[in-house]
Image (cartoon, helix red, strand yellow):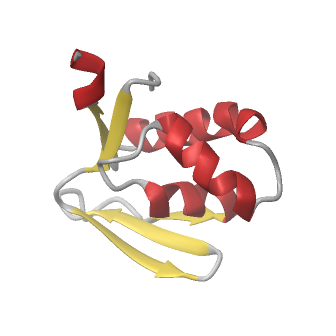
Amino acid sequence: MGNSDVPRRRVGIAAVERPGRVAVLDTDRLAQAPVILLGLAADVWRTVDGSRSRDDIARELASLWDTTPGELTEVVAEALDALVSCGFIERVRSADSDQ
């Protein structure tokens, strides 16, 4: 996922959030088991709202994880790519990238 892309949750995705974990289910594919996100992956999921870029998410989570945004950028990118591959989120071009 590029820096100018903004991730958003796909329509038809359901999630149950608990401290430290999130269960995510594609309601269009009920035969598939839910995916359980733990730790940082769960926190990445929670920040995907259609308005934050990868770098925005890394900045937000850096204080929570007591690290720097630069140290989280790669891990956040990998988590977002995995969520895209699972079909739980999609990439949307940021309005700022068109300027």
Number of numbered discs overlaid on the protein picture: 0
Q: Closest to the observer: 18 or 98?
A: 98
- Examine the rendered structure and indicate whether residue 41 appears above or below residue 25: above
Q: Closest to the observer: 62 or 91?
A: 62
Q: State the image quarter where residue 77 is shown.
A: top right
Which residue appears at 34% of the width and 50% of the height?
88
- On the rendered image, what quadrant is the C terminus found in? top left
- On the rendered image, what quadrant is the N terminus found in? top left
As drawn, which residue projects farthest toward the bottom?
18
Which residue appears at 69% of the width and 64% of the height?
39
As drawn, which residue projects farthest toward the right?
66
Q: Is residue 85 left or right of residue 66?
A: left
- Examine the rendered structure and indicate whether residue 5 appears above or below residue 35: above
Residue 70 position, x and y percent, is: 73, 33
- Examine the rendered structure and indicate whether residue 35 appears above or below residue 7: below
Q: Is residue 15 left or right of residue 95?
A: right
Q: Is residue 80 left or right of residue 78?
A: left
Residue 71 position, x and y percent, is: 78, 36
As drawn, which residue projects farthest toward the top?
99
Which residue appears at 57% of the width and 42% of the height?
79
Q: Closest to the observer: 14 or 7?
A: 7
Residue 67 position, x and y percent, is: 82, 50
